[in-house]
Structures are given as C-alpha cells and as structure tokens.
Image (spheres, rainbow, N blue to C red):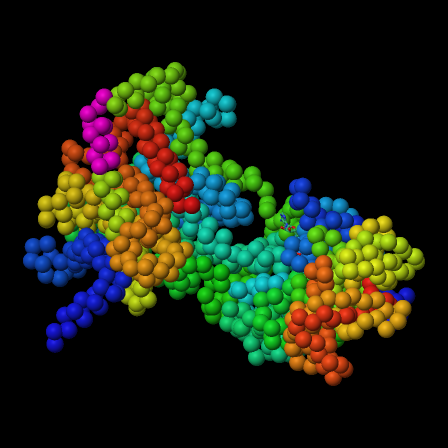
Amino acid sequence: MSSAPSLVLSRFRSNPLWLALPAVLLLAAFFLFPMGRLFLLGVQDPQTGALTAEHYLRLTEAPVYWRILGITFRIAILTALFSVILGYPLALWLSRMDSRKQSLLALLVLLPFWTSYLVKTFAWMILLGHRGVLNTLFVEAGLIERPLGLMYNELGVIIGMVHAMMPLAVLTMLPVMNGIDRRLTLAAGTMGASRSQRFWLVYFPLSVPGAAAAGLLTFITSLGFFIVPAFLGGSGQTMLAQTIITQVQELVNWSFAAVLASLMVVAALISIWIYNRFFGLSTISGGSSSDGVRASSGILRRLGRRFLEFMAWISSPFDRFGSSIGNDDRGSAIYPVLALIFLIAPMLVVFPLAFTSASSLQFPPPGFSLRWFEQYVNSPVWISATIRSFGVALATAFCATVLGGLAALGLARSRSRWNGPLFALMLAPMVVPRIVIAVGLFYLMAQIGLVATNTGLVIGHTLLAIPYCFITIGAVLKSYDWRLNQAAETLGAGRLTILRRITLPLLRGGVIAAGLFAFVTSFDELTIAIFISGGLRTTLPKQMWDDMFLQLNPTLAAVSVVVLVIVTAILLAAQKLQK
Amino acid sequence: MTAASRQNKLVLEGLSKRYGAFTALEPTSLSVDDGEFLTLLGPSGSGKTTLLQMISGLTEPSEGKLWVDGEDWTFRPVNQRGMGLVFQHYALFPHMTVAENVAFPLQMRKLPQAELRSRVDETLKKVQLDAFAHRFPKELSGGQQQRVALARCFVFRPRLILMDEPLGALDKALRENMQMEIRRLHKEYGTTVVYVTHDQEEALVMSDRICVMNHAKVEQLGAPHRIYADPETLFAATFIGHSNVLTGKRLSMDDRTAVIRTPSGDFRGAYTARDRGTEKVALIVRPEQMRLGPPPDGEYDGVTGRLNDLVYVGADTRLLVSLPDSTEIMLRHDPATGAMPAIGDQVAVHWAKSAARIVS
Ligand SMILES: Nc1ncnc2c1ncn2[C@@H]1O[C@H](COP(=O)(O)OP(=O)(O)OP(=O)(O)O)[C@@H](O)[C@H]1O
Ligand SMILES: [Mg+2]
C-alpha cells in the first residue's frame, strides 16, 4: 500500500508532457476560458444570465452589420489573394537559392514581417496622402494634374493590407517550396515537358499546399485587422474589428461585441476546417507536405488536371524567354527584386522625415535637424511609454520563452495521444484573431482587477508570444541528439543537471532567438495594449496609435525610426543566433 | 551485327565541364554504338554524373560538341532530346499515381488517349506493377518505386536511355534482380543505354563496354573482358578485379612488350600502357595467373617471398605473400594440385610472361 503514492509520483515525474503544464494552465486561464466566456456573453441575457438569441437577432435587424461583415470578408479575401499571388514568385525565387543566400535575402522579408503594423501604416499614410510623397512626386513629374485619391478608400486599405500580409504569405510558402524536390522538374524536362509544362503540371501542384496555407493565414489575420482600415480606409471600409472596438470602448455593449467576435472566430474555424479537409494541417505546422493535395475524388483531380493543362498551354508562348538549354528555370530576378522593394522601401520613407527641419511631414524635407528626436527624448509621455514597453517586453520574453520552451521540450519527448491537441493549443493564439483574444482578456481582467497593470499586459503578450517561442525552440529540438541526455545520465547526472548543463547550452541559440522574437512581439503589440494598458500609463505602440489619431507629426516619424532600428537590431541578432 | 554496320548513336567530341577553376570533366571524346549498353564506372567525384548530365542536356558543357545520330545536339533544349533518364532517387511525381507517372511522358508527346492507355498498361505489366497502377509512389516499396521509374522511362521508347546509379538505393538481392530486369528491357527494346555506377561487379554483369573514369578523365574504354585482360592504366587494373602490382622503371620496350625493373627483379610483359613515353610503369599479374613454385622455363618469370597468410574461400585458398620490399601479392592455390605451404615459409611464385601486363 505504501508504494502507491511513490508510484503516482514516479509516473508524474516520468511523463515529459508535464513540462507543458505551466503553458497549458496559462492558456486555459487567460485564453480558453475568456474565449468561452465571450461566446457565452453572446447568447446570455446580460441581467438574468438566461440563454437568449436576442443579440444574434440584432444582426438581422441592422443591415449595417451585414454590410460590415461583407466588407470585412471582401477585404480579407482580396488581401489574401493579392498577398499570395504577389508573394508566390518571390517565394519561388528565394527557394531556388542556396541556403546561405536565401537566409540572407529572407531577412528582407522577415524585417517587414516583424515591423510593427503601426509603423508600416504610418509610412503608407505619408506616401499615399493627398499631399503625400507619391502625389507630390507625380504632380511634379507632370504625370498627373491633381493629386489622386490613394487613401481613405478601398485602394488604400488593400495596398496597406497586402503590404502588411505579404511577408507572412512568403514566409509560409517558402518552407513548402524548399521541400519540393528539384529533380522532379528536371525529370519532367527529360520526358519532354516544356518550361510551362514543368511548372504547371509538376511544380505548381506540389506548391499548392503552401500557397493555400499562406492564403489561410493571411485571410484569418486580415479578418481581425483594424489598424490599416482605421488609418488608410474611409467610412466605407470599416471592418469588423473596428466595430468590435467601438462596441466595447464606446458603447460598452459586451453582448453584441461577443456576437461579432464569435462570428469572426467561426469564420476563422471554418476556413481552417476547409483547409484541413484538402491539405491537412501538418503543412502549416512545418511538416513537409511534398505529396501535394490530399487524394481527392476523381472528378476534382481530373478538373484540376484540366485546369493545369490549360494554364500550361496559355503560358507556353513565353517558354522561349527562358534559357535555351538545361534545367535552369531560374527566371528573371526583376519581379522578385521589385517585390522586395515594395516590402522594404515604404518603411524607409520615415527616415528622411524623422530628420526634417520642417514642422510638418512635407516631402522632400526642406532641411536636416534633430529637433524631433529631441522632442521625443524630452517628452515624458513618450519616454515613459518607451520604458514601459521595454519592461513589458523583457518580462514577456522571459515568461514566453520559459513556458513555450518547456512545452516544446515536453512535446518533443512525448509520444502521447495528447500531443496533437496540445500542439494545436500552443499554436492557437497565433491563429485566433488578436482582437478576439484582446476583448476576451479585457472582460476577464476587468473583473479581476488586472486592467491597467503591467501584470495584465505581460500575461496578454505572453499568450501571443508563446506560439513563436514554441515553434522556434521546437525547431532546434528537432535536431537535438537525445542520446546525449542518456549519456549524461549514465555518467551520473540528474534531470535538472542535464537540463542545465547539457540541453540548455546546446539549445542556447534557439532559446535566445525565441526570447528575442517574444520581445519583438510584445514591443510591437497594439491590440491588447489598447484594452489593457489603461489610460495614462501607455505603451509605445498605444501612444503611437493615439497620436496618429490626433495628428500626423514628425515626432511620429522619429519614434518610427527608433522602433525600426530596435526591431532590426533584435532581428539580426536572432537570425545570427538561430544558425 | 558487325562493327562496320553499326551506327554511332552518340558521339562526344572533346566535351568538358568546368566550375570556375575546378574541372569536373576533362575534355572527353568517345562514341556509343546504336543498341549498345555502355557503363560509366568510377569512384565518387570522378565526373560520371557530370558526363551523363551533359548528354541529357541538364548541364551545359564548357567546351566540346555532342552529336546524336550525326546531328549537333550540344545546345538542344533538354525537353527536345527525347532521351530517357532514370535518377538515383527515382524522382517520381508524388502527386500523381503510378499510372499517371508512367503516362506523363506520353502526354507530353500528345499521344491519343486510347493508345496512351494501352501503352501504359502494357509497360506496367512488363515490370509487374499492373496491380499497383492507382497507388501513389509513397505507397510503394523501394524496389517497386524503382520499377515505376524504369517503366516511366521505357514507356515512351526512347532510343537512348541514361541511368545514374539507378540501383544505388536498393539492397543487394533486389539490386541483382533489377540488374536482370534492366538487361531484359534493354534487349527487348534494343535501346542504347548509358549507365552510371561505381559498383564494378554491376558494371561487369551488365555492360557491353565499360568506360572507366578517374579524376575527371576517362582511364580506359572497352569490353569488360578486354579491360580485365588488358588494362591500360594502373587505376583500371586495380579498380576492376584484383591485381598484383609490381612498380618500377621501364628498362626497354619493343612493339608489344617491355621490360620493367622492380626491386624484385626485371620482368617482361605485354606493354598495354596507352602512354608510350612514361618511365614509371607497373607490372600487373592477375591472381589466377600466378602459381606456386619456381619458373619452369624461360617463358616464365618468378619471385620469392614469405607466406604471410592463408585465407580459405570455398573451393580454393588465397595465399598472401610479401616480397622483400614488402610489396604484397595474392595468388590462388588449389590444394588438390600440390602441397600447402605453412605460414612463415619462404615460397616461390611464378607466372607466364604472356600473362603479365605493363601499364602506366
Ligand atoms: N554544380 C557544381 N558546382 C561545382 N562543382 C560541381 C558541381 N557539380 C559537380 N561538381 C564537382 O564535379 C566533380 C564531379 O562530380 P560528379 O557528380 O560528376 O561525380 P560522380 O562521378 O557522379 O560521383 P558520385 O559517384 O559520387 O555520384 C565533383 O568533384 C563535384 O564536386
Ligand atoms: Mg554521381
């Protein structure tokens, strides 16, 4: 009898899945639970708590919400479509480089990926405005007589959104394309396939899972977007997330906000389900899926085949522009370079404007001065926001790395049937629209007094950063040789000693990289900060957001430069450490 | 078919490949007859794949010309060459079924649907895969995948097939099986085949002629038994079969024979070296040409040494003898023909001068 407790204890100790427990607890308390609450709010009477459909019925009463839903879907679909189509050739070009060159050039995609949406949007406002950089240039060049309406309309929103989402699309497609065996197109060539046939009949179908995953992720992320439409769109481009913010912050109508948030989650889940039906989720979580589309019914396959043959036929006239002999389907670098310029150049516009001597954002700047940086350094509001952001980001980096790292370690060592669900849970905060997480969290934290506290912010940001840490550390664990642990064990080391002396030193690069990613995630984070950071003590992104609503000024450009420089430095460090 | 009536299917004229300052293949000239099975044999990095890829059009040559059926094909696009190519790792299209994989080259040739079907069925039957037509490649074993790759290659009846270590990934038993399969298909279709391997046994079994390659150069080209009997270079002699090698300097030479001075004495042998100017040469005698005992008459040469080891290999025994300059030689000894010496004994070994070869 006395052995029973020790048996339980040894079981407890030996199952590595327990390492994931802290992360699971955090996600359960601050992610799953609030989401469940939010869903319930939508079907409960706010006073009595009885089940009711009245909030959902409101949707049918006010056509304005249908319009907003329609706009949101339209913009999200267009964004996903353009991001994938414009990103595909760039990813293709990158995938054909040797790995050293690829990781170097991929930095030019990673940089805009990690750069804050606010900085990107701010840059586009400078570029697209009525007296913006582009209009000024065009008018001066005599191309147009009067400035074009480039923003406060759908065009502006789509430009901004595609710019924001294309890096995600490229980074999702790249691993799939890297996994495609290049000998397959060579083989097709020797069997008589022309350039376009090699691409459309062999390469393209194998890359479809990657392109579809890119479409899925960009679509879901776009669904919950509010920064770009808030600044670059007009009243006709109000999206769902903006409406949710209004419902919560101005109308304090929790029930209806919950309805809208639930709709958003349902839309996201349906698109994930469709994707899983056709491709399987392993493509997204990094498993190579070189076998392409899941064996589907005969008719679909045949239709797809006809379509590809048609595409091959359509594009065959362009075959002769390729190289005359050999396997080099390398293609020209003109488009990919233009695409990289599209991703990078807009953000660079903040640099000259941060050093302007004028007190407006006129372009080109009339002279050089450091006054806006002085303004920034001497402003207690900006400095305290910066310091707070740094503190929160550091704490987040620590928490997310520890929790995500332990979870990755546990899952890597376990062959349990719980692995699948836990894996999904760890990645879920990346897939569920941030606005939904933020609203749910706000509701919960308002009740337990965590709003406007640093703790609340750190918890929220840790939720968002855990997936990145989990993926980054999981990736290094894949190549870790577990026999080293056994070797250490035979030499007399205990579990903790092994972790401290063997595992951690070997994983150090990956762990630090994960910490840096978490840092950047928090440092750039706006959505949760809008709700949780409270009135006076804001974070840097929240302060930017507030300022951008009031008035565009060169201080914002100076702050953008600061943010860009910090993010770039951290990214370069992370990239170096990941090797 | 006599040699004269044979057509040159493929002619290489000074074909070479350089990557920057590095030479992957020195200028190489050779010709392949119609219907011939030619094997490129050589150690890793000797340029076999490079040579094959230039024939296929996947790699552009740095210099030289490639003629197929008397036409200059040096810069012909890969998809207009109509050659069959079998890759080491098969390169089956993972998103297509077995039948679709095999049909692919026929579709590229726009064959009518009915004919396409019957050709695919027929070819799959030939490689005994008709029952697997609707499976995907990853649902097949390694050997089955290899047979799909062969079927996909033979199905469009290319007149020239290039294979780059197609059996490299298979285990020994399966490999021998597939060797026979490839031989059979080759005979049945009368195809010209250029085959790459670094397995000398495979090369000996399958080829009409072998092209021995080393250090980005062709060392020797000829029928397997010719290379075995009359190696031209030391590398060819040691890479194919076992050779006893006595190195030394050339003393004299006439039309066909030469005398070599080695630490163990002066020996005469047929001079097969391609290069007639070299001073440093080697005497080659195959183990089965050596006998125990002193040379019986002037037609024989011999050495003496210490018996180092005896290895029983079934029917005969291998004797390892080390000469005073510590060169080691090996000979076979049939215990039925004479008394077996003991390890440590001094033994005399002889061979017929006509069986010795002098190579460079
Ligand atoms: N793309 C390339 N760039 C630079 N060097 C190359 C390239 N391809 C091949 N080489 C070099 O050319 C030489 C010959 O290579 P090749 O692939 O022809 O060898 P191989 O005889 O097929 O060897 P193996 O038996 O290992 O396949 C090698 O030293 C190789 O490193
Ligand atoms: Mg090779």
Residue A388 on the magenta segment: yes
Q: Residue furthest bottom?
A: B336
Q: Nearer the viewer, residue A53 or A518?
A: A518
Give the image quarter of residue A45.
bottom left
**Residue A341 appears in the picture as rendered:** yes
Q: Main secondary structure of the magenta part?
A: helix
Identity of the residue drawn at 32% across and 42% down = A516
Identity of the residue drawn at 61% across and 63% down = B88
**Residue B245 at x, y percent in the picture:** 75, 61
Q: Nearer the viewer, residue B342 or B220?
A: B342
Q: Residue furthest front?
A: B345
**Image side of residue A364 versus residue A241, left or right:** right
Give the image quarter of residue B90.
bottom right
Above or below: residue A169 compared with residue A484: above
Picture quarter with the N terminus of chain A: bottom left
Picture quarter with the C terminus of chain A: top left
Q: Nearer the viewer, residue A410 or A457?
A: A410
Above or below: residue B127 compared with residue B355: below
Magenta-colored span: A378-391
Above or below: residue A413 compared with residue A106: below
Above or below: residue A209 compared with residue B353: above
Q: Nearer the viewer, residue A254 or A57?
A: A254
**Residue A305 at x, y percent in the picture:** 55, 63
Identity of the residue drawn at 66% across and 63% down = B198
Residue A149 on the magenta segment: no
**Residue B31 at x, y percent in the picture:** 81, 59
